[in-house]
Image: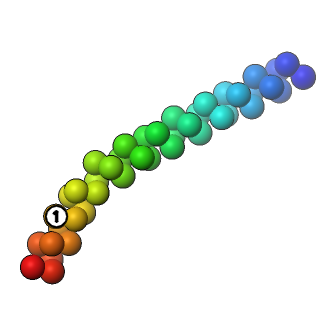
Amino acid sequence: MAGHDENFKDDSGLLAVFLGLAVLLGMSALPATIGWVQLATG
């Protein structure tokens, strides 16, 4: 039971790290995307 709980906690932590990275990537890519859109439409 303890091993299962520990494993679940590890998976949750991994998911949080992945989500954090995804958010960071999205935030850093957003200005570049807006710039490209303005370049393409302008």
Instruction: Please tell me which residue lies in front, 3 or 16.
Output: 16
The quarter of the picture where residue 6 lies is top right
What amino acid is at disc 1? Gly
Query: Farthest residue in the bottom direction?
Result: 41
Where does residue 39 sit, x and y in percent of width and height? 11, 72
Residue at image position (44%, 47%) is: 22
Residue at image position (85%, 19%) is: 2
Query: Farthest residue in the right direction?
Result: 1
Which quarter of the figure is the C terminus placed in? Answer: bottom left
Q: Is residue 6 left or right of residue 2?
A: left
Q: Is residue 36 above or below residue 40?
A: above
Scheme by which the image is coloured:
rainbow
Q: Is residue 38 above or below residue 4?
A: below
Q: Is residue 40 above or below residue 36?
A: below
Where does residue 19 sit, x and y in percent of width and height? 51, 43
The quarter of the picture where residue 13 lies is top right
Mark 1 nearby-residue class (10 Å; few <14, some 14–19, many ≥20): few
Q: Is residue 16 above or below residue 9?
A: below
As helix, strand or loop, the secondary structure at mark 1 comes to helix
Where does residue 33 sit, x and y in percent of width and height? 24, 63
Total number of numbered discs in the rendering: 1
Q: Is residue 10 left or right of residue 3?
A: left
Where does residue 15 sit, x and y in percent of width and height? 59, 39
Q: Is residue 40 left or right of residue 33?
A: left
Which quarter of the figure is the N terminus placed in? Answer: top right
